[in-house]
Image (tube, helix red, strand yellow):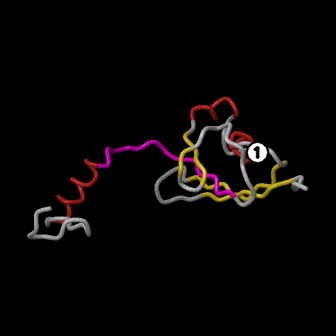
Amino acid sequence: MAPAELAVELFWSPVRGELREQRLTLPAGSTLRDALVASAWFEPARIDALTAGIWGRTAALDTPLREQDRVEVYRPLTVDPKEARRQRFEAAGSRIVTRHRPLGRKA
């Protein structure tokens, strides 16, 4: 027999350096959209414009939730990831070494 309710956690970072967390108890069969509405953090008219996901993977707002899901709301990117890497390189003043390509060897 399926439980009548499910517990999920909702995470949202409205600005850099701030993380909000909320535990929600929702009726069984609830969707990602239902969790966002239940949080009362977002205006219902603007929920369709949000990018959200479950456990780090973007998902449609009509995705059904399961017990203990981690629901996340993502901010839009403010800078292209490639540009952010270039900026970190300029700030560090040295080559950024990754584990994929050690210095001195060409792949």
Looking at the picture, how far across and down is residue 29, in whole percent?
80, 45
The residue pinned by badge 1 equals 38
Specify the farthest residue to the left: 104
Q: Secondary structure at mark 1?
A: helix
> Is 35 positioned to the left or the right of 2 in the image?
left
| Lateral position of residue 69 relative to residue 56, left or right | right
Residue drawn at (65%, 59%) of the image = 21
**On the rendered image, what quadrant is the C terminus found in?**
bottom left
Q: Which residues are magenta?
A: 69-81
Give x and y (percent) for residue 70. Answer: 64, 57
Amino acid at pointer 1: Ala
Residue at the image point whose x is 54% and y is 53% from the top: 13
- Residue at the spot x=20%, y=68% of the render? 97
Residue 30, quarter of picture:
top right
In the displayed structure, does residue 37 sit left or right of residue 94?
Answer: right
Q: Nearer the viewer, residue 81 or 79?
A: 81
Task: Find out whether residue 31 is within the magenta segment.
Answer: no
User: What residue is rendered at 64% in x and 52% in y?
Assistant: 71
